Amino acid sequence: MAKHTDDLGELETRLGYRFRDPSLLREALTHASAGSARDNQRLEFLGDALLNFTVALLLHRERPDWQEGSMSKFRGVLVRTESLHEWALELGLERALRAVHPRKAPPMGSKPLADALEALLAAIFLDAQAAGDDATTLVRDLVERRFLAPIRQANPESWTKLDPKTHLQETTARLGLPVPVYTKVDLAGPGHAPRFTMRVSVGPHSAQAEGPTRKGAEGEAARQLLDQLGTHA
């Protein structure tokens, strides 16, 4: 119990937020596989909306020179699973999830951790709202702490480097090439640490890469193919 409390207390310290209702924190860290009556899927639904809204708000405020298309694509880059997974690891969500479910460890891949992060944002919002605090500003400040610097440092085409799959699709359409086709070449490693090998083909052109997630491997393969085509920004 002491270890459980320490891990959750460390998470709250890193967030800079203390829960008045600890059950909300537990719910945010409860994966559906735990078989609990209250898992984090409903909170994840709300957190996803909060995250997209606050990132859109930041982009609109910080990049008055950008058009809607660039803002939309860069928001997609910032809130993608890989980005949220990195944030979750920095917060120590993996340890917190294990602390809440010591007998049955939940999945620790990029998607479950990204989902738990979104659920955590929703839990903070609801906890703060119930206490009479400005919940929207509180969540916005957390998101701003994470994404303000990348937004300020970006240019309207930054998304092309961070979202190579979309960039490849738009590039091939512009060049009159076929639509990119992704195929799985191999899946190795244990369930908690898989290694995907994916190939992308565009007409006679192809490239393959590996990564810890299917999307990550596809993105790296797309980036390599863009380099072959000589169009990668």
Image: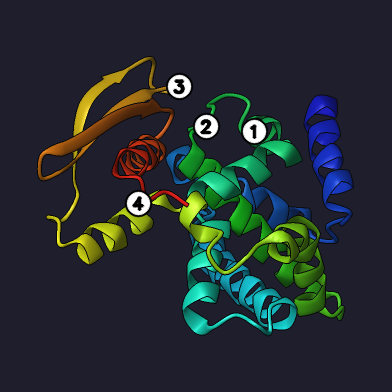
Instruction: Give the SS element for disc 3.
Output: loop
The residue where tag 1 is placed is 94
The residue where tag 3 is placed is 193
Which class describes the residues within 10 Å of circle 2: few (<14), some (14-19), or many (20+)?
some
Above/below status of 129 relative to 5 = below
The residue where tag 2 is placed is 108
- The numbered mark, 4 or 1, whose residue comes first in the sequence reads 1
Q: Whole-Å distance between the Cαs marked 3 and 1?
A: 13 Å
Above/below status of 167 relative to 132 = above
In the image shown, does 22 or 145 lie closer to the viewer? 145
- The numbered mark, 3 or 2, whose residue comes first in the sequence reads 2
Point out residue 76 in the picture as x, y percentages from the top left corner: 49, 63
* The quarter of the displayed image where residue 9 is located: top right
* The quarter of the displayed image where residue 16 is located: bottom right
Horizontal arrangement in the rendering, residue 233 relative to residue 60 (left or right): left
Above/below status of 142 relative to 106 = below
Look at discs 4 and 1 and give the one toward the viewer.
4
Q: Whole-Å distance between the Cαs marked 4 and 1?
A: 28 Å
Q: Which mark is residue 165?
A: 4
In the image shown, does 78 or 7 lie closer to the viewer? 78
In the image shown, does 49 or 163 lie closer to the viewer? 163
- The numbered mark, 1 or 2, whose residue comes first in the sequence reads 1
Horizontal arrangement in the rendering, residue 233 relative to residue 231 (left or right): right
